[in-house]
Amino acid sequence: MSPSPFQHRRAPANRRTPLRSRPRGPALLRALLILLILPFLLPPAAADSLMSMAVRDLEVPGELRDGTLVAVAGRPVLIDGAGGSAQVRAIDGDRWEPVLAAPELLARLARHPLAGDILIGEHGRHVEVLSWDQARLRSQALPPLPEPLSDARAARFQGGWRIAGIGEDGAPRLYAGAFAGTDEGGWRRQPAWDGGAPAALLAHTGRLLVVETTAGANATHRWSEDLGWQRVQAAPGAIDPRLVRALGQAHALFAVSRPEGGRLATLNTITGAWTMLPQVLESDTLGWAPWADGAAWLARDGLHLAEPVERQPLLKWQDWVVLSVYLVLVLGVGLYFYLREKSASAADFFVGGRSIPFWAAGISLYATNVSSISFIAIPAKSFESNWQYLTNNLIGVLGLMFVAVWVVPLLRRLDLMSVFSYLETRFHPAIRMLASALCIVMQVGSRMSVILFLPSLAIATITGMDVAWSILIMGVFTIVYTALGGMRAVIWTDFVQVLVMFGGALFAIGFIFWHLDGGVSEFARIAMAEHKTRVFDFSFDLTRATVWGFLFLVVFDVVLTFPKDQVLMQRVLSTPSARAAGRSVWTFAAITIPGGILFYGIGTALYVYYQAHPERMDPWLPIDSTFPLFIAAELPTGVTGLIIAGIFAAAMSTLSSIINSVSTLLSVDFYQRLSRRPSERGSVRLAEWTTVLVGAVGMGLAWLLASYDVQSLFDVSIELAGLLGGGFAGAYTLGMFTTRANWQGVAIGIASALVVTFGAWSMDLVHPYFYLAISIMTCIVVGYLASLLFPPPAQSLAGLTVHTGRGGGTPAPLAQAARAK
């Protein structure tokens, strides 16, 4: 059989040519207005399926042509007609090998050719787990089920097993087991679906799926921890239980019987929507098995394999032009400030000469805080679950109010360039250098690598470009304009990038609303019916993202960690006065809630859109690629390039901020302290070179991250920040809000926080959102109690705590240190 495209094509008669519209005139507001109007002028997306597969023939050993094909523990096995011998496809996929197994085991397999690695006996109670040792098939008996089950199906789930079937009373049953012993009590009965006999059971991405075939209904049921059992879209035909497999992070592949013959179908486990793959297969199949990224089936005319076809890049030359213009513009901003301030002082390079308007600093604060995580990972998180993480934005505004009134003005009056200079004056030089070093590790290790990787993943999804090249291009452009222009280039580029980012996001969500059947009302109906806009979880489960967890997070991540965040504080320190510094934080707070609603709304809009158009999803892409896929596959040529520029803008604004801040810390906290003859010019030159070095290290870590399969990079960034960032945040709390804490106690507190937090992480005790709170609380409590064992601070604390005055200018010790540096 010759290869044929396994591809869905709809009639192109109603397709319209996209209208290409280019903003004219120099006014930025006019361009943004046109961008917002475009969704209502452009045609719907093309209807072609993105799930392209091809079929090819595979060689079958002659003696097994009339045998049975089954899947055992992820590997295809051919069993002869009598069930007395079998051959397994070798691990390298190039040859068949004889299976070494007991004949009675092969006979049982031939009688019960179900997908998976659990074999359930004929009487519905005997359970055995199958596994491979090279070509030897091994069987391990599990405890018998508490009752006989008919139509039993099994799947691995959450480190154990789930078995679904019909009990003796005709009602559905679901049992869970993860066995340390061999007693019958090892099987625990779980809540079952409301339906009939299961044809298939699948566990995938934290969800259980049951597809039944009762009276031809083909009902599909989905279980999740948040919502329990739900009935989703019915299967498009009767499910063949011999082929049930996961695809990627959010799809499953099934064999479906239809009146016209056998078909393959996919189910999106998040939206619950089915997609039929078009080619009709032989109805008389002798077996199915998962194979590589596709599926194989044995028919009378031989063995066939359906596997994915490599998709062509979706970015057109017009999109590349738009993206290139954007990259040249940001380089131009850096070059402009470099030529304007060739002999810039340290204050000019690190804090923009302390002349940045409060509103520009506030917008830059937002740009730095959101990054590509907001543009890519938050829509993906909302698409996969709901708006629960928006609680962080809502409560965070209250924390920012406190910061704007109490914390920021105190530190701005000290005229710092490195926020860790405060720790030296309040405590000890060793505390300053330790905290600065931990901050550098956290920013480069937990933030920079993730922020570099996410947009690179988007570009790879859209263009077909290797992720490594995407990381390289974005990293190099960011390094160059940051090294050339310093803080002024960073902040003013942030301002432009926020406009590009919000313009792209508004265009995307407007495009979905306009081309969705039913528009905004349909969006609201589905979102409410499926709890996609649920925000608050008031449960006390510490392993979940609850309101109480976010309260802890805001108190500890916003109020108590804002002072130690060099990336954010460097913008605050760039304003002309303490009053302007506070107003910059108010500006930041004013943008946070509408920005959060916009990006979480995009994720929900994508859910509604792909539930209506499941054929437009690519099953082999990760969940974090959902929004980039939509941008590439659905939006008009040219506009795609503009919104991709928005993704770059979101990432590069944060990258430039991190690189500039880390180079500031290396120069101010280490060079100026450790060099025998530090100079202002040498400090600036070192910062320029360390900008290149830090950027190169970040790119290297992003390349390393690209080699791992990480389901949610949003969660990863939270986890790493909690593990590395809490200890020295507690040091600021002790310094600013107590007068008794001393450097010895703070050092003990920081060390204790690191030990306790890594212990909680290693034992998986709580949700990662609690790591930061645990770390800060440990540092505060242990640090304060340890301080009581040593003499109180001997130096003046005037202007260094909230208890010792908010006025009076810079404390004498810090003023002397600033003049010396």
Image (cartoon, grey):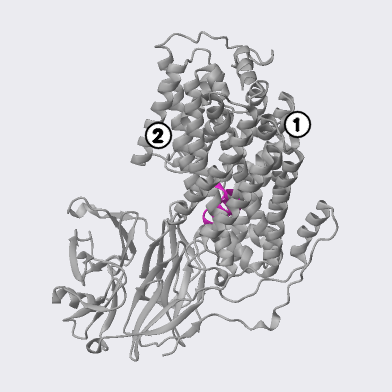
386 falls in the magenta region:
yes
Q: Which range is magenta? A: 373-388
Which of discs 1 and 2 lies nearer the camera? The answer is: 1
Seen in the picture, residue 346 relative to 327 is either above or below; the reply is above
Kindly state the secondary structure of the residue where label 2 is placed: helix
Q: Identify residue for label 1.
A: 355
Disc nearer the start of the sequence (1/2): 1
Say which amino acid is labelled 1.
Ser
The percent position of residue 234, horizontal first and vertical second, equals 48, 71
Quadrant that contains the N terminus? bottom left
Asked if residue 166 lies left or right of residue 212, the reply is: left
Asked if residue 131 lies left or right of residue 366, the reply is: left
Say which amino acid is labelled 2.
Thr
Residue shown at 83%/55% (left/top)?
30
C-alpha separation, residue under disc 1 versus residue under disc 2: 40 Å
Q: Residue furthest front?
A: 677
Residue shown at 68%/37% (left/top)?
487
Asked if residue 327 lies left or right of residue 813, the reply is: right
Kindly state the secondary structure of the residue where label 1 is placed: loop
Q: Identify residue for label 2.
A: 757
629 falls in the magenta region:
no
The residue nearer to you, when weighing 796 against 660, is: 660
Residue shown at 28%/79% (left/top)?
95
The residue carrying pointer 1 sits among few (fewer than 14), some (14 to 19) or many (20 or more) residues within 10 Å by Cα, namely some
The percent position of residue 625, horizontal first and vertical second, equals 54, 60
Quadrant that contains the C terminus? top right
The percent position of residue 405, horizontal first and vertical second, equals 67, 25
The residue carrying pointer 2 sits among few (fewer than 14), some (14 to 19) or many (20 or more) residues within 10 Å by Cα, namely many
